[in-house]
Amino acid sequence: MPTNADPSCIFCKIIAGDIPSYKVLETDHTIAFLDINPVSVGHTQIIPKYHAKTLIDLPDAHLADIGPLLKKVALMTGAVEYNVLQNNGAMAFQHVPHVHFHVIPKTRKDDGLV
Ligand code: 5GP
Ligand code: ZN
């Protein structure tokens, strides 16, 4: 659990291991895990081990750790083409109030997922 965890936050619970997840990468500051409701095969969430609602609230040291992991996760998916998506606030379609970055591989339509 992050030192500043919000006990009601789903992603803080994932960090603490209180909710299971399929982790693909982890550093001292960051974890990456598969999305529970993927929009494509390999859809991954990258989150700081620090409870901040939006990008602006996130200390630079945590943000700096995430950048290289975006590249690593994108490479790990094997996707040549992919989206990196980051939503801030309800109007921007943020549903989980713990800052997160989606890596969304673009896969063939015959995978059944787009
Ligand atoms: P948002 O809409 O806030 O940008 O994205 C939140 C993402 O978190 C969604 O893609 C959703 O499927 C994912 N998500 C929500 N709850 C869980 C969970 O308990 N486990 C995992 N692995 N992903 C989750
Ligand atoms: Zn949190």
Image (tube, rainbow, N blue to C red):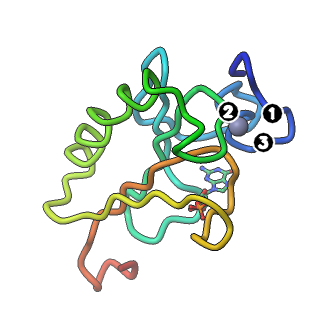
- Of residues 66 and 110, the one nearer the viewer is 66
Residues marked 3 and 1 touching at CB (< 8 Å): yes
Residues marked 2 and 1 touching at CB (< 8 Å): yes
Q: Please state which amino acid type lies under the numbered disc 1.
A: Asp
Quadrant of residue 98 in the image? top right
Separation of marks 3 and 1 at Cα, in angstroms: 5 Å
Q: Indicate the position of residue 1 as horizontal and vertical percent values.
A: 72, 21
Q: Quadrant of ligand 2?
A: top right
Queried on whether the Cβ of the residue with tag 2 lies below 8 angstroms from ligand 2, the answer reads yes
> In the structure shown, which secondary structural element does the residue marked by tag 1 occupy?
loop
Q: Indicate the position of residue 72 as horizontal and vertical percent values.
A: 25, 37
Queried on whether the Cβ of the residue with tag 1 lies below 8 angstroms from ligand 2, the answer reads yes
Name the residue that disc number 3 marks. 9
Label of residue 6 in the image:
1
> In the structure shown, which secondary structural element does the residue marked by tag 2 occupy?
loop
Tell which circle, 3 or 2, labels the residue nearer the N-terminal end.
3
